[in-house]
Amino acid sequence: MQVFSVIIMRIDKFLKVSRIIKRRTVANDACDGAHISVNGRVVKASYEVKVGDIIEVSFGERTLRVRVTDVKEVTRKNDASALYEVMPE
């Protein structure tokens, strides 16, 4: 029998761990300000990220669109970009 461990992570923490946004408080504020959407829906900071989710982050006039490829509690700076893939606009 195989046991799969599923890591559940809030979107504000995922944005910080993946280094899309530098600080968790900034990620939390971005969620509160409706600058973060997942799969086309604006989400709160408590949204639980899953592999395959498409996250859109609005930075003023620019929007970053990424697909979640992995969810990890901790990652090194050099490996952070492996948690997502940038999608064309």
Image (spheres, grey):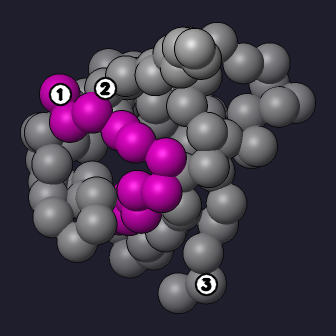
Label 2: how many Cα within 10 Å (few below 14, some 14–19, many 20+): some
**Residue 32, how many percent across, how many down?**
12, 39
**Label 2–label 1 contact, CB within 8 A:** yes
Q: Which residue carries the number 2 mark? A: 10
Residue closest to the far front: 1
**Residue 33, how many percent across, how many down?**
13, 47
Left or right: 76 with respect to 48?
A: right
What is the distance, in whole Å, between disc 3 and disc 2 at their CAs? Answer: 24 Å
Q: Is residue 3 magenta?
A: no
Magenta-drawn segment? 46-59
The amino acid sitting under disc 2 is: Arg
Residue 13 lies in quadrant = top left
Left or right: 42 with respect to 61?
A: left
Q: Which residue carries the number 3 mark? A: 88
Label 1: how many Cα within 10 Å (few below 14, some 14–19, many 20+): few
The amino acid sitting under disc 1 is: Ser
**Label 3–label 2 contact, CB within 8 A:** no
**Residue 11, how many percent across, how many down?**
33, 34
Q: Secondary structure at mark 1?
A: loop
Label ID, residue 46: 1
